[in-house]
Image (cartoon, rainbow, N blue to C red):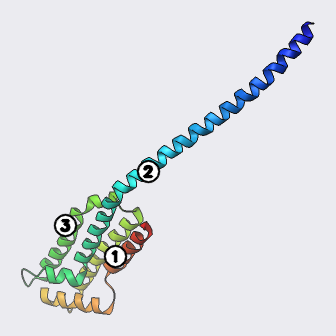
């Protein structure tokens, strides 16, 4: 009789085990789905809060690129003397100061975008330095002419970076 009783006991335990395993599986999946839903809702709330800040960062960097565009920079920053070296230093200092005011914006934009903006800054500085080294550049006014002539022949380095910013903002929407 003991063997029959043990078999009966196992027969009663099997449905209980199956129900227990199914309950465990469903509760585990439910908990996982709830956790995923909470994360999604939190991410969605953060995006709503962060999007205006990111857009503002892109706006500030676009303004920076406009301000360091050689044609606009030369109009905004007139030479203080006829010395071309002083004017070159003044232009480069102005570009660097503009970037210092916007350093914190790199937190809100992509690393690739920040690298392109930095490359545009460096290319603009290089353009100014090369123009200053030319023999025909005798004074500050001549330096301005040479840089402006160069800009008529090709695009400003900041234009390419500005185009990239526009593309990246387009991907946000």
Give residue 132's quadrant in the image.
bottom left
Asked if the residues shown at circle 1 and circle 3 are in contact, with their CB atoms under 8 angstroms apart, the answer is no
Question: Is residue 20 rendered to the left or right of residue 38?
Answer: right
Question: Is residue 117 rendered to the left or right of residue 137?
Answer: right
Question: Is residue 66 rendered to the left or right of residue 140?
Answer: right
Residue for point 52% across, 41% down: 35
Alpha carbon separation for disc pair 1 and 2? 28 Å
Residue for point 32% across, 67% down: 58
Categorize mark 2 by other alpha carbons within 10 Å: few (<14), some (14-19), many (20+): few
Quarter in which the C terminus is drawn: bottom left
- Of 12 and 125, the residue lying toward us: 12
Quarter in which the N terminus is drawn: top right
Q: Which residue is mark 1?
A: 162
Give residue 14's quadrant in the image.
top right
Categorize mark 1 by other alpha carbons within 10 Å: few (<14), some (14-19), many (20+): many
Mark 2 secondary-structure assignment: helix
Q: Position of residue 172 (x, y in %)?
A: 42, 66
Alpha carbon separation for disc pair 1 and 3? 19 Å
Mark 1 secondary-structure assignment: helix
Categorize mark 3 by other alpha carbons within 10 Å: few (<14), some (14-19), many (20+): few
Judged by depth in the image, the label closer to the viewer, 1 or 2, is: 2
Mark 3 secondary-structure assignment: helix
Q: Say if residue 173 shows up in the picture.
A: yes
Judged by depth in the image, the label closer to the viewer, 1 or 3, is: 1
Asked if the residues shown at circle 1 and circle 2 are in contact, with their CB atoms under 8 angstroms apart, the answer is no
Between disc 1 and disc 3, whose residue precedes?
Answer: 3
Between disc 1 and disc 2, whose residue precedes?
Answer: 2
**Residue 97 image label:** 3
Alpha carbon separation for disc pair 3 and 2? 35 Å
Q: Position of residue 118 (x, y in %)?
A: 33, 69
Q: Which residue is mark 2?
A: 43
Give residue 112's quadrant in the image.
bottom left
């Amino acid at each position: 009789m003991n063997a029959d009783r043990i078999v009966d006991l196992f027969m009663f335990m099997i449905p209980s085990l199956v129900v227990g395993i199914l309950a465990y599986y469903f509760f585990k999946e439910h908990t996982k789905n709830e956790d995923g839903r909470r994360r999604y809702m939190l991410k969605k709330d953060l995006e709503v809060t962060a999007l205006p800040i990111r857009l503002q960062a892109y706006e500030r960097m676009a303004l920076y690129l406009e301000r360091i565009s050689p044609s606009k920079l030369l109009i905004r920053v007139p030479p203080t003397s006829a010395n071309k070296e002083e004017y070159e230093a003044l232009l480069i200092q102005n570009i660097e100061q503009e970037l210092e005011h916007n350093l914190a914006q790199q937190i809100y934009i992509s690393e690739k975008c920040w690298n392109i903006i930095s490359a545009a800054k460096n290319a603009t500085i290089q353009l100014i330095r090369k123009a200053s080294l030319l023999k025909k550049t005798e004074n500050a006014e001549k330096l301005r002419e040479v840089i402006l002539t160069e800009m008529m022949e090709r695009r400003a380095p900041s234009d390419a970076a500005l185009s990239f910013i526009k593309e990246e903002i387009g991907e946000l929407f």
